[in-house]
Image (spheres, rainbow, N blue to C red):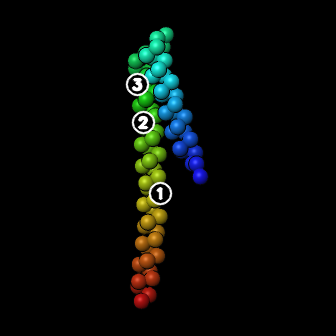
Amino acid sequence: MVKIEDIIIWIMFILSIIIFLWYIFGNSPNFEQVILGIAITFLLTVSFKIGGFGVRLLQVEKRFIKFEKRFSRL
């Protein structure tokens, strides 16, 4: 199943490629604006990946707590 974060990342990636190509072929935004578009895409990607890692880590922690409770019953 496709997550909303993945859709946002792909949209930002495509927009950054469009801005970069627009810069290369002229009549385009400043170099700083191109870098800003690429940096925002990179930062969003990193934040979504770190957030997803935190969620997975929380799930592992919950499973470990369940395992610990079962072990203490023994």
| Earlier residue among tags 1 and 3 | 3
| Residue furthest out toward the top | 27
Q: Is residue 4 above or below residue 57?
A: above
| Earlier residue among tags 2 and 3 | 3
Q: Residue at x 45, y 41 (%)?
A: 45
Q: Amino acid at mark 2?
A: Phe
Identify the residue under disc 3: 35
Q: Position of residue 30 (x, y in %)?
A: 43, 15
Identify the residue under disc 2: 42
Q: Is residue 18 above or below residue 7?
A: above
Whether residue 29 is visible, yes or no, is no
Left or right side of 2 for 28:
left
| Residue furthest out toward the bottom | 74
Mark 3 residue crowding within 10 angstroms, few (<14) / some (14–19) / many (20+) = some
| Earlier residue among tags 2 and 1 | 2
Q: Is residue 5 above or below residue 64?
A: above
Quarter of the figure that contains the C terminus: bottom left
Q: Which mark is residue 55?
A: 1
Instruction: For the residues labelled 2 and 1, say whether their Cβ atoms are less than 8 Å apart.
Output: no
Q: Is residue 13 above or below residue 21?
A: below
Q: Secondary structure at mark 2?
A: helix
Q: Position of residue 41 (x, y in %)?
A: 46, 34
Mark 2 residue crowding within 10 angstroms, few (<14) / some (14–19) / many (20+) = some
Q: Residue at x 42, y 49 (%)?
A: 50
Q: Secondary structure at mark 1?
A: helix
Task: Look at discs 2 and 1 and give the one toward the viewer.
Answer: 2
Q: Amino acid at mark 3?
A: Ile
Q: Position of residue 4 (x, y in %)?
A: 58, 45
Q: Amino acid at mark 1?
A: Val
